[in-house]
Image (spheres, helix red, strand yellow):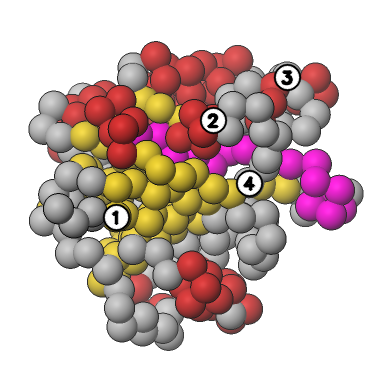
Amino acid sequence: MSTKTYKIFSWNVNGIRAVLKKGSLEKLLEEKSPDILCLQETKAKKDQIEANFKEYEELWNSAERPGYSGTAIFTKKHPTQIINGFTEDLEIAKNWDEDAYGTPLNEGRILTAEYEEFFLVTVYTPNSKQDLSRLKLREKLWDPTFLKFLKDLEKTKSVVVCGDFNAAHTEIDLARPKQNEKNAGYTKAERQGIENLIKAGFIDTFRELHPEEKRYTWWSHFGHARENNVGWRIDYFFISESLKKNLKAAEIYESQTGSDHCPISITLEF
């Protein structure tokens, strides 16, 4: 009986036009040849980029606001269904317009592709902002709604979710936890959002396979943070408990440049 393998990558590119110009995206696709590549913070619409990756079908969920946010999936395997954003019932159930920055519902933050074995969700979680002015939206609206969205999908089949969660979960996930306890990305509320995913049955794939490793996926532009590896692990792959037996690898690619984030990946076998 033949094995079916999914090599799935995720990368916050911090502007797809920038990584294309640098040649970083082509390098990743050529060297790693992922079956599926999930992107966050694309900051573009499909017709704004000059690239044709012939092996890949391109799925896009771009923000209405130009040059902002956005997600995309480049896939060799044709999905059976595509969902942009939350389902309609979740969008109308809450008052999303109360945020001073506008509604995250038109920022292209979630893109879902359905495959035979699982739903694949890529997410660019709203940043709480340096002054924590978007923390309330995240804690009270975004995180619980996103978890409900994943659990609703899970009623049909297993879920793989990846992307930039804009939070480090525990002390091992950032270089300087004590100095950042009240800062965006490591507040109790943001960490609880990650904890709630895990309590709901989703497995942090990297931590599952590398329980003690201090590895990071994002570095500040200031203070030579990347050179000194003063980083944060804020990009994740979570999977349904039912997929634990299929998880064969979970990796971080710190040497891949082009963005302030680096790519991460998992390998699933069926």
Q: Is residue 214 above or below residue 221?
A: above
Counting from the top left corner in percent of width and height, residue 104 is at: 39, 41
Is label 4 or label 2 in front?
Answer: 2
Pointer 1: what residue? Answer: 5
Disc nearest the viewer among 4 and 3: 4
List the residue tagged with mark 4. 217
Give whichever of 12, 210 is nearer the camera: 210
Residue 24: mark? none
**Magenta region:** 224-239
- Residue 104 visible in the displayed image: no
In the image, 35: left or right of 173?
left
Disc 3 secondary structure class:
loop
Residue that numbered label 2 is attached to = 207
Q: Nearer the viewer, mark 2 or mark 3?
A: 2
Q: Which residue is mark 3?
A: 181
Amino acid at circle 1: Thr
Residue at figure coordinates x 63%, y 21% from the top left: 170
List x then y, in percent, for residue 28: 52, 70
Which amino acid, mark 2? Arg
Q: Is residue 236 magenta?
A: yes
Q: Name the residue located 11 percent from the left edge and 32 percent from the top edge.
A: 156
Check disc 1 and report its element: helix, strand or loop: strand
Tell me if label 4 and label 3 are in contact, CB under 8 Å: no
| Relative to 138, residue 68 above or below | below
Cα distance, mark 2 to mark 3?
A: 21 Å
* CA gap, disc 3 and disc 1: 39 Å
Residue 258 falls inside the magenta stretch:
no
Which of the two labelled residues, at mark 1 and mark 2, occupies the earlier sequence position? 1
Image spot of residue 132 (x, y percent): 63, 27
